[in-house]
Amino acid sequence: MSNEEFIAFIKKNVIPVACVLASIAIGLVLYFRSDALPEAEKVLAQKTQEGELFAANIEDAEHLPEQQKAILASNDDIENRMIRVGQLAENLQYFYQLESDTGTKLTPVQVPWNPPPKAAAKTNFTTVSFTLTAQGEYRQLVDLLRKLENGEHYCRIDTCSMRPLSEVRGGPLTMSLSLELLANQ
């Protein structure tokens, strides 16, 4: 077949020749690009996941201002319920107020100094330990415990023991407490 015959054949069969050439081109592209397909699928999956995350974040962001206000209000409440480490007189006044509210008699409150360990993590909060002894009727001592538990400051009672002051049944009791109050440094 000569060049002239070949050109005539192409002119006579333009559509079939164009389809064959397009098929060959598509086959070559697929052959050379087939190794990039798995990586492109990974990129597509990653972009899809990022898009879903962005969509979820946008949906969740609608309530952020209200949630931020609630968190700030809660932080203020927590801050107000903590004692201050350096304000010993105010901290002791809390116990004397409990004494007058419950009708118990407190012996002097002891505040042992417990320095934090040197390897301890740096935090904004610490605890201050207190040891106290209260005297009163059973009802008054239980009321004192309830007021400590549900009171103005966050309190954790480490140890608590009660014993009678005398051999008289139903008489006054003495209660020894070791407790910690959450404090702001």
Image: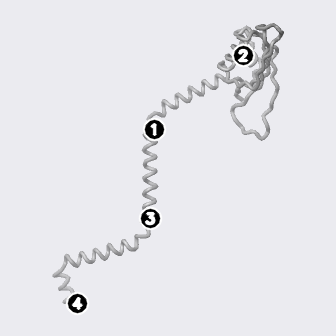
How many angstroms separate mark 1 from mark 3 (CA)?
33 Å
Provide the residue designation for mark 4: 3
- Separation of marks 1 and 4 at Cα, in angstroms: 70 Å
Whichever of labels 1 and 3 marks the residue nearer the N terminus, that label is 3
| CB within 8 Å, label 4 to label 3 | no
Spatial CA distance of label 4 from label 2 is 110 Å
Task: From the top left corner, tell me how far across and down residue 172 is, in percent.
Answer: 78, 9
- Residue beneath disc 3: 38
Q: Secondary structure at mark 4?
A: helix
| Mark 3 residue crowding within 10 angstroms, few (<14) / some (14–19) / many (20+) | few
| Residue 8, position as x, y percentages in the image | 17, 85
- Secondary structure under tag 2 reads helix
Q: Which quarter shows the N terminus?
A: bottom left
Disc 4 to disc 3, C-alpha distance: 44 Å
Residue type for callout 3:
Pro
Q: Residue 64: x, y in percent?
A: 48, 34
Relative height, residue 177 to residue 5 (above, below): above
User: Earlier along the polypeptide chain: callout 1 or callout 4?
Assistant: 4
Residues under labels 2 and 3: Cα distance? 69 Å
